[in-house]
Amino acid sequence: LWGYDTGLNNLNEYLCGIQSEYIIIGARPSQGKTALGLQIALNLAKKGHKGVFFQLEMSDEAITFRAISSESGINIKMLKSGFVDSGRPLEKVQRAMTDLVEVPIAIEDNIKEIHEIAARIRYLVRCEDYKWAMIDHLSKATTSNNRVPKVEQASEISGILQDLRKELNIPIIALAQLRRDAEGKTPCLADLRDSGSYEQDADTIIFIDREREHDANAIPTDLIIAKQRDGAIGVAKTVFLPQMVTFKDAVNEGGKQ
């Protein structure tokens, strides 16, 4: 791959891996954007590419639970309840925790102001040799002047991230909410919430599109590459596993991914 491996072969085919671009992953709430972002982040870090994950909505403990569930394959509800069966399930959790300790990823859950985020990214890239940054999610980021309209704040945030990407030449991946009226339909670029600047500034935009099935163990999910400045648009077929809050490649009728 020209870029960093996402861990999903079907997505890699369209992106040629994660490039040094400003990338937006968009979805409605509870569609799996944090799960997809964290999965990509962990895969990058496990391959030795240090990075920082800015979590503006959840705590670092909540993100850690998700990471352990995804890595171990153990139901996240079981982890949160504390009732993990002894034997092989417990061994999987212990092995996952041991492996994750070595993963070079920093989780920042106490910074929301965009200039502070940018300053932190600059320091980590220039002084600590970090290779990528991820922000979850854009609607929670703030600017130094909260009195201006939300649209203007969003435009400033998007412009800062694109300029930062050019300055540091690293992938900057931002997760984004979609408008409320995007619920129940295939998302498009106009559905990005708060500002059209996201649509204009981003190099690549990926939407998560799936049915809201509450009892399914595996939910077919389309990752729609709606914009790619230097590549083709299309749909990467995946399957979402809600119990482990993780994605895997869909398998076609011929048995291939």
Image (cartoon, rainbow, N blue to C red):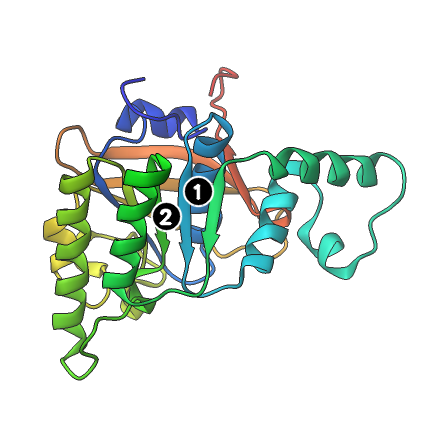
Q: Of 23 and 117, which appears nearest the observer?
A: 117
Residue 244 seen by the camera: yes
162 left or right of 208? left
Q: Is residue 112 above or below residue 132?
A: below
Q: CA distance from mark 2 to mark 1?
A: 7 Å
| Secondary element at image label 1 | strand
Which residue does the image show at 36% across and 30% down from the upper left?
11
Residue 49: percent from the left, percent from the top?
A: 41, 30
Circle 1 crowding by C-alpha within 10 Å: few under 14, some 14–19, many from 20: many
Q: Which label belongs to residue 221?
A: 1
Identify the image quadrant of residue 230: top left
Q: Which residue extends farthest front? A: 127
Q: Which residue extends farthest bottom? A: 147
Identify the image quadrant of residue 233: top left
Q: Which residue is mark 2?
A: 208
Q: Is residue 1 above or below residue 244?
A: above
- The type of residue carrying mark 2 is Ile
Residue 25 seen by the camera: no
Q: Which quadrant does the N terminus fall into?
A: top left
Q: Is residue 112 above or below residue 226?
A: below
228 left or right of 28? left
Q: Of 115 and 227, which appears nearest the observer?
A: 115
Mark 1 and mark 2 in contact (Cβ < 8 Å)? yes
How many labels, in total? 2
- The type of residue carrying mark 1 is Thr
